[in-house]
Image (cartoon, rainbow, N blue to C red):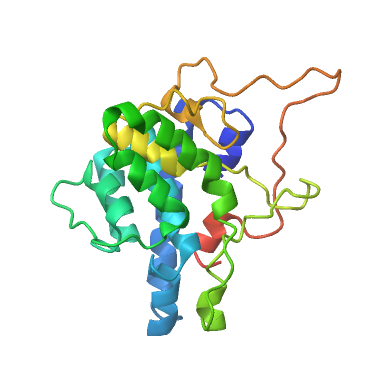
Amino acid sequence: MLLSRYSRGDDIQELAQYFPPLLDAWEESERLGKDVFTPQQQYTRHAWKVNLDHYIVCFWLVGLALALELPDAQWQRLLLLIGNEGEDQLLDRIIASRQTGRKIGVTLCHPKPYQRLLNAIDAPAAQQARLLADFVQHWYRELDRPAKPGNAPATAMYERPYWYSLGNRQLEDSGYFGRWCVEAVAAVKAFGLDDSQCLGLEHYPGDLLRPNGPSTHPARPDNGDDQTPTIPSPPCKSWWQRLLGR
């Protein structure tokens, strides 16, 4: 819902209102799931290292929470739901920008594509803008990952984001909500990176960091038709529904 509303151009300052119901639904899903899923199923649903979809959604929610400056009470609820403390060198560091004392992982759960973002964060200041743009430009392409040889079907399905091909055909009935590299916004907000070379790039949601405008997205050509993006109500599972296991 949050990214769909961003895609259609909703006021950035209005997006934060959707966090409380999201957290309520996620908490209820976790409560109910304790009696439904086996320990192995719980692991594959929640572990960043084996579930790329869950890792990305957690990254998106952290990035949105930082960009929208979520109140502390909601931030703490989000962290309890995310878990995985000490599991990832990159996302743990971004969370630690607001959660003092968080344990930082020593490895990167998903080097492709996230090694590029880690490189940008660790680079000298003069190189960060270029490397951040390099990450954004490669982000979508490098998420097109084949399953690792020998992986069981239960884990192989998590090697490529479920939403990767949504919108390739008709937007209607596709569940498409945009392809936004919120991970880059999370790093910019957490570490004060220069995102000037990302502005206007296809997948960079720079307006999240500029709620008062002007928009960072290029104007759509005026062909006489209504060019306003329309995000339909999807019949297939949204990233929110998948997060909740519905």
Query: Quadrant where the C terminus lies?
Result: bottom right
Q: Judge from the rendering whether residue 232 lies leftward or rightward of residue 61; answer left or right.
A: right
Residue 211 placement (x, y as % from top left)? 45, 22
Determine the residue located farthest toward the left in the rendered image: 101
- Which residue is at the front of the view, 164 or 35? 164
Q: Judge from the rendering whether residue 228 lies leftward or rightward of residue 53; answer left or right.
A: right
- Which residue is at the front of the view, 118 or 8? 118
Vertical relation: 223 (above or below) 83: above
Vertical relation: 156 (above or below) 75: below
Q: In this view of the protein, can residue 97 be seen by the observer?
A: yes
Quadrant in the picture for residue 4: top right
Residue 238 placement (x, y as % from top left)? 60, 55
Residue 23 placement (x, y as % from top left)? 40, 52
Q: Judge from the rendering whether residue 188 lies leftward or rightward of residue 245; answer left or right.
A: left
- Which residue is at the front of the view, 48 or 29? 48
Q: Residue at x 52, y 14 (%)?
A: 214
Q: Residue at x 72, y 43 (%)?
A: 232
Q: In this view of the protein, can residue 69 be seen by the observer?
A: no
Vertical relation: 213 (above or below) 12: above
Residue 136 placement (x, y as % from top left)? 50, 39
Q: Residue at x 38, y 61 (%)?
A: 27
Q: Residue at x 44, y 75 (%)?
A: 44
Q: How many marks?
A: 0
Query: Quadrant where the N terminus lies?
Result: top right
- Which residue is at the front of the view, 213 or 235? 213
Determine the residue located farthest toward the right in the rendered image: 224
